[in-house]
């Protein structure tokens, strides 16, 4: 028996050894130099930076087990996203989900993008990357937050503690649904809402007042695609959104979206920002290894000045996994409420960088 | 010389490139829905979730170098375990160890489960997973903590700053020993113990008053296995434990353990909780791809009400790496000391989920 | 269409799947036992511990895209380096960079060692590892910090938010340059400098007063190598350093370095520590699988006692990737300024451990 060293002690530790072949490592490194009106040149990113681990296990009869864990980080400083002590983003900010896939569709549990937030990226001219010149993080979501009861540093476009169900794609049609549990997520800042400072509507580490949920439907037919989405978050803000894209020729994709946010549950009807709507139009034009991105959009909250944004971008593929980019945008945003003047503030932004998938 | 670009600058950075083949990635994703008396349904886990990296280097003559690094995370929120600012668990909470293995056995340095905590899992009906229906995190350890001077959020069943020695298995017998250094681990809460609030027995960032150490011996003979373990932690709480398992037929495993904790060093003899004992009996019965888990146990601290737990579980393997589980448990626990009444509190717990190894 | 399940929803998530072959995992685990005058024996490290991910993509025509992400951790406790809430080191403390390499050299963006800090390690007798017996973290850099405006726990020998350019090696000669952006890094402690406590020269989360930058030139000819380096950090402290190594026979490497730090921007000329110089001499002698390390060095700050250090070390390779080490050092350092006496403090240090690359 002398050969089987530490068999007992390592039994637990080494379980899973046979599974090695199933893990795929993937990711993105995106870093560039940018300049915004009023600040010095900075090293930053245009896309989210990811380091992920995922796998698929074939269970036979068309059934599969899936998992995916995705670290998100900042290449300019080497930190995970938004590091700030207790308010840090999760290590696996990108997603952490496990599930089953079969003829019935896909069921997953854990943390990930909501159906609306994930579906809408395909109809945004910057493909949903959080570039300053892009529209996803502000106009495309009408300023809406999927995760308002999470700590301040956490990203706002995901559900934690949720179950996802995606139907199969049938005749170009797919339905995606996610429902979150009524669990507290450790928000450290109270949401006053319709309450008072002393008795806020949602206190620190508040429970959701309703199960957060969302659904999106997508339809694709030849050159045409469209979606419709609805979502209600943990503080009962509601959003609906529709969008469509069309390719009049293979190299050209035209797209438009509209979204409307209703904050009636936390904002009084006569207060500013009770409702917000936003629309975006955009185009992508492919020229050999290059791609031109164009976009224009307007966000209109109740009783507050509009946000208007015009952007142009260019991506040049130096390989299938690596491209160089240039972005240029002009954005008019309302000044903070504390400012006496009611004028807009205009900000120009330039960036150049490299985007590498691995 | 023009071909060897950045040779000097990258020399350090790229050392180790030849070693790639030696790293194995492994892990677990376990997520499910659970419901406990008095709370809403939640997304949670039943087993610890792991993402690990390990390797073995063959040094010739039967000698091997080993390392293992194991991240632990929560799939429902994407965070590492117990994220709470300065009290966060270590990134490699599972373990971080390096060592040598040969005919003499295995020597490892770093952080990992203590011999008692690791050995006892094989004699617990839920195999040591921290399921609410399982016994490992409370009754199986008689409420004992291996790591009392670590920050509050840190798990209590590991030694940091320790050396491990495991003998080879000889005629079914194996001895495992671990000794910790007397290093402060940054506890942020004082342990009053036999001191006073102003002069606590162990202050903030206190040094151990003795080297923590533990040992376990295991013996396996055909259908029979048994262990005995002893451990003394950094505040000189002592624990001993014995257990055995027997398989009257291949599909059925019966098991029982007993453990006794002595807190004499920090608790006055006439105070509550001076000594604690606990016992558990359990069974695992395999039926084709399914496994039935049964357990009952009682923990009896001095002068405090007992904790009693009865649990039933079922695991259904849909592949060698993936199973679905159902757990049901009933647990009577003493109410917190601040409560006027001396009654027990009874909690029922149900959970269903998926467990995937990769 | 029924076969392409969740095609749309997973489109973003699974991008990059084709790139799997390009990621290399590598790292180091170094753990040992050490004893320093006045403290108990401890489990610790001699080298930095790394878990890294890197890849090279061949773009054709000699052009390559590179990325490298390097986690740094403590194996004795399982944490990332210097965990302390908001002051934690970045997850990818080692480096996080992306870039392009071609006939023109290498351009990278992100966070990494400065040219001086990286180049000088090849001329230090412990090869730049942060061993107590080694010279890199104190004498080799004359006490200089490349990153003074980073949070307290962060390592001081890297630039964040920087661009690197390394020339190709031409006739044994190579030039490396890095320039940092003027971005705030979130320092939580003010640098009083030439200011006052109420109006510190660099406040909390201060911007650099100048772009940090550095350059190093290295030259290699047969048995001879030399470097010269210059660096100016975010608070305009300047450092220059020169060094050389010579191999009179293949088994023996002799080396010497000199460095001078000028803190004129933050320290008054008549104050202590206005200028610091330091020199080190050392030797490495290879004997079969063993290597003997010898070093002696002196650091001399203005108007403060000198630091003198003599060290001897031995590394014994048990494979190409694993060695055992023994270190012994004697270090005289000035007592802290708050101490009444002006005597030096003498500290002896012993360590033994294992170093494993994977």
Image (tube, coloured by chain):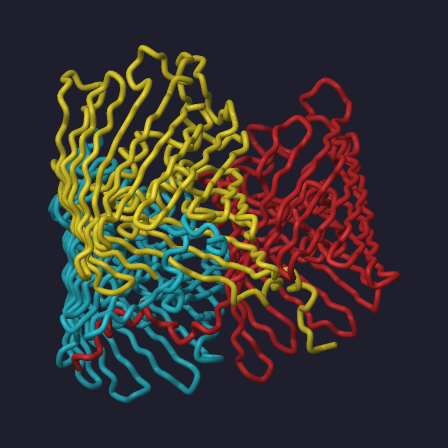
Chain colours: A cyan, B yellow, C red
Quick one: quadrant of the N terminus of chain B? bottom right
Q: Residue at x 40, y 37 (%)?
A: B116
Tell whether B322 sits left or right of A94: left
Relative height, residue A81 to residue B312 (above, below):
below
Residue C16, image x and y in percent?
A: 39, 72
Tell whether C219 sits left or right of B5: right
Taking depth in this image into account, of A18 and B132 the one nearest to the observer is A18
Q: Residue at x 55, y 68 (%)?
A: C99
Which residue sits furthest right? C248
Residue A133, image x and y in percent?
A: 38, 65
Tell whether A268 sits left or right of C184: left
Tell whether B141 sits left or right of A222: right
Residue B45 shows in this picture: no
Residue C9, image x and y in percent?
A: 24, 69
| Picture quadrant where residue A15 is located | bottom left
Relative height, residue A135 to residue B273 (above, below):
below
Q: Residue at x 31, y 65 (%)?
A: A135
Residue B336 shows in this picture: yes
Taking depth in this image into account, of B334 and C199 the one nearest to the observer is B334
Q: Residue at x 77, y 39 (%)?
A: C275
Residue C283, image x and y in percent?
A: 81, 51
């Amino acid at each position: 028996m002398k050969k089987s060293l530490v068999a007992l002690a390592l039994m637990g530790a080494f379980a899973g050894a046979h599974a090695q072949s199933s893990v795929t490592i993937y990711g993105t490194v995106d870093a560039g130099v940018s300049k915004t009106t009023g600040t010095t040149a900075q090293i930053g990113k245009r896309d989210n930076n990811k380091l992920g681990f995922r796998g698929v296990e074939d269970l036979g009869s068309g059934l599969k087990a899936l998992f995916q864990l995705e670290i998100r980080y900042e290449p300019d400083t080497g930190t995970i996203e938004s590091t700030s002590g207790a308010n840090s983003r999760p290590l696996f900010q990108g997603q952490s989900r496990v599930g089953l896939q079969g003829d019935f569709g896909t069921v997953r549990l854990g943390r990930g993008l909501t159906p609306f937030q994930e579906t809408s990226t395909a109809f945004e001219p910057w493909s949903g990357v959080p570039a300053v010149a892009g529209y996803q993080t502000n106009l495309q979501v009408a300023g809406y937050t999927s995760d308002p009861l999470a700590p301040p540093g956490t990203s706002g476009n995901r559900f934690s503690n949720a179950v996802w169900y995606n139907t199969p794609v049938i005749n170009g049609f797919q339905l995606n649904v996610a429902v979150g549990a009524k669990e507290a997520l450790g928000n450290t800042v109270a949401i006053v809402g319709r309450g008072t400072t002393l008795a806020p509507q949602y206190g620190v580490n508040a429970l959701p007042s309703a199960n957060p949920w969302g659904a999106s439907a997508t339809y694709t037919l030849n050159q045409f695609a469209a979606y419709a989405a609805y979502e209600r978050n943990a503080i009962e803000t509601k959003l609906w959104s529709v969008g469509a894209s069309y390719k009049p020729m293979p190299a050209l994709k035209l797209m438009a979206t509209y979204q409307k946010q209703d904050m009636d549950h936390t904002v009084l009807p006569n207060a500013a920002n009770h409702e917000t709507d936003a629309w975006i139009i955009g185009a992508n034009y492919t020229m050999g290894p290059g791609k031109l991105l164009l976009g224009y959009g307007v966000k209109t909250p109740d009783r507050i000045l509009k946000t208007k944004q015009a952007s142009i971008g260019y991506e040049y593929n130096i390989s299938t996994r690596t491209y160089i980019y240039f972005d240029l945008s002009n954005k008019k945003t309302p000044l903070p409420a504390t400012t006496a003047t009611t004028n807009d503030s205009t900000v120009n932004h330039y960036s150049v960088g490299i985007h590498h998938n691995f």
